[in-house]
Amino acid sequence: MTGTEQFISEIRSLLGADNVFTDTAHVYSYSFDSSIYRGRPDAVIRVRSTDDVSGVLKLANIHEVPVIARGGGSSLCGQTIPVKGGIIMDMQAMNRIVDIRVGDLLAVVESGVVNDQLNVALKPHGFFFPPGPSSGSVATFGGMIANNASGMNAIKYGATRDHVLGMTIVLPTGEVVQAGTRTIKNSSGYQIDRLMFGSEGTLGIVTQAVVRITPLEEYSMGALIGFDTLEAAGQGISNVIAYPLIPTGMELMDRVCIDSVNKGMGAGFPDKEALIYVKLGGFKESVERQKIQLEEIARSSGSTFMEITDDPSTIAGWTKGRQSVLPCLSRYDPDMVCVNLADDMAVPISRLPEAVKRFQAVSKKHGIIVATYGHAGDGNLHTKMLVNPTSEKSWRAAEKTTEGIYDVVLELGGTVTGEHGISISKAPYFRKERESLIPAMVTLKKALDPKNILNPGKIDQWKGGLYDRLDILRYPVEGSL
Amino acid sequence: MSSEGFSHAKKHLHEMHICTQCGYCRSVCPTFKEVLMEPEAARSRVILSWGLVQGEIEPDQSVIDALYHCTTCADCNRRCPSNVDVVSIMESVRQDLYEMDAIPENHRDMISSIEEYKNPARQSAEARLDFVPDDIPDRTGGGDVLLYFGCGMGYTDMKMLTSTINSLEKLEVDYTFLGKDESCCGFPELVMGKVHGMEERARQNLTALERLDPKPTKVVVTCAACYRAWAKYYKDMVGHDLEVFHIVQYYNELLRDGKLVFKKGLGKKIIYHDPCDIGRHMKIYDEPRNLLASIPDTELVEFEKNREEAACCGGGGGLKNVDYDLSITIAESRVRQAIDREAQVIVTACPTCKANLADAAHNIKKKDEIKVKVMDVVELVNKLI
């Protein structure tokens, strides 16, 4: 019996046989997430409590078996792909909303609670959890913390990190610690909880979180503003922020994105080179004033289309259209599919116009269709590429395009990830961006996870390029299989 | 491993690549919502199908279970932002699995029953007439409207059959039925993967209809799956020029023409459950609501998830035949949604939905002592006209 087999056998004793899966359907379906990568686990296990997680990690340390925690599996950069075998630890059965205390501005959730599940529960109280990732119907709190997820509302409300007060963490050795507090404020002491944001499951497993909740906005408006060039739209966004006007959300979509959601789901967006979708929210008087300011900025920024409404169904339709950009891009060209490459970056807001213009030049140089969109109000852009999924030539051109785009981002003082994380697909560029930080990360990882069992081979440990070996791709590239 | 034998699923290869595995389908997939493990999610069924086509995995029992647990409710199709047609992929991969003899054991029994008896219940052809009330005239000789019984109503739900027949008698419809010449619609064979079986049933039923004199020009069915078979698949597979109605549509026409009049109300709060096969698949939403809203002294309320967003009852796609417990767990969730809306009666338009929801309501009554009645629209109409 190998070490892994012995480990799985002991896990069966710990969790019960009905929580350990080695059959084809489980092992194969957990080999994929929403990234371009794949990797088979040796087994899938289901945990139901902090004690379960602690017991699993203690055994994993003894047998030195990799453990990858997984929530909704909506990660875009390969976070839940086992690159060194081991087990997938499914956290979704830990899905209880433990407490809601509106008087204390907090809720307590297990890590398998889905973002939208909490918001449904908070709505009758007049509250919500603001970060709002597009994948909110799938993403769990464990994954949102591990990737510091955010979405359209980040410009006004920030990311997940800004709305978590405390948490229960199982450290890689199996030790359970309470980090942070149940109070709005706390001061000194090492803020170990903060290390979890962006750790991608490499430093500890969050099993429960105390999250800060926020009153729902009383009144909302949505605006669609059209431009004749992508660069003009980027300038328009910068002008809104500099005015200063801080909306609830401000999204950018280029021509490719507009066409794809119109085609994919009949979004009905106007036929423009670029659109900015602005969400205004707050007290009615304040929103009406913001509307006047926004109209003035749009006019002076050279917009060629503008529609503003407070009709909830129209706003919901626009939001749904924007949220559907990513998956709809695959319908843009019948021979192509949309892949997550250079899918996330952030640049200083004032550099947006230059960034989007230079991205277009990179796209043209390598002959790859690049769609640009994102939460541009906070400088966070997403570019997606359309590739022929079975053509090595297409993948190699996409690789060059990714490199070119990230070179631009770093030149402009940006970062290679605003909200999707690093894992595998950003690792080569993250190394470039934060070269001086890597040794400290290595030291920290060794201190907390001496046997390197938690999600090994990711972030700084990923030493390869985007896809040196084509067989790590989930697509059947000719000659790779 | 070999991908030979997956020729039907292979046609959807690009569609499988378009699926980004975003997982948005998980929020609506009825099996995933209960089990919370990936093989029970629509996106995983796509990737498992892909694995089979690529020859990366074998169709072992775990894979067969995952693919045959899909209820084919199509809520994933609706939710998918890339418009991936998961149900078509499921139909094709099941067709491949059937041709490779890799199907669940329970389905073998049902398929052989349909082959041997022309119904999935191992009942004789004559038994289809057992529930027909004695006091009605012989209706097997032909007429303008064919009342197609279907197997759910014909063999297992006496209340539905007598209600349907009695209502048509009261409404003075010139109807006929096939009697012992009726075959299963073939829909169970389609969802189990025996696609040519459905085509055979189509020919049997259409041939039996041709023999009637006068030959019907309209077909009325009470089962949502039978409706989909006659209105869509029979037309695609064999072709016919019959006008096909689900009975909610037919009643609704009679209501519009002033021929159907409710003489009394129910005095209760009712809620309409959209069967997936006439709802999301065939877009019949307004007719049942129009019909039920016209009942006096009866309040019609809606599920939070209704019409195209309606949750599945768990009875479709053959799930009930392979995993009864999971099927009923899904139905219990749906019944609890009706209880949340304080409905006293769940009204649906399909014997499969009715049976599943009724079993679930029975369980809930035993567990929580909360009572909610489940009725088919034909029972309600017959009772109140």
Image: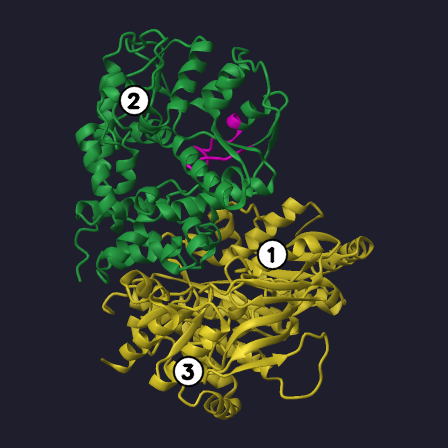
Shown colour of chain A = yellow
Asked whether residue A37 appears in the rendered view, the answer is: no
Q: Are marks 1 and 3 on the same chain?
A: yes
Q: Secondary structure at mark 2?
A: loop
Rendered residue at 64%/46% (across/down): A314
The nearer-to-camera label among 1 and 3 is: 3
The nearer-to-camera label among 2 and 3 is: 3
A61 w.r.t. B308: above or below: below
> Disc 3 marks which residue?
A58
Residues packed near mark 1 inside 10 Å, few (<14), some (14 to 19) or many (20 plus):
some
Q: Secondary structure at mark 3?
A: helix
Residue B65 lies in the magenta stretch: no
Shown colour of chain B = green
Quarter of the figure with residue B17: bottom left
The nearer-to-camera label among 1 and 2 is: 2
Work out whether mark 1 precedes mark 3 in sequence or the reverse, and give the earlier one: 3
Whether pointer 1 and pointer 3 mark residues with C-beta atoms closer than 8 Å, the reply is: no
Instruction: Indicate the amino acid at tag 3.
Output: Lys
Q: Which x, y percent locates residue A348?
A: 63, 75
Q: Chain of mark 3?
A: A
Q: Which residues are magenta?
A: B271-288
Left or right of A300 on screen, residue B374:
left
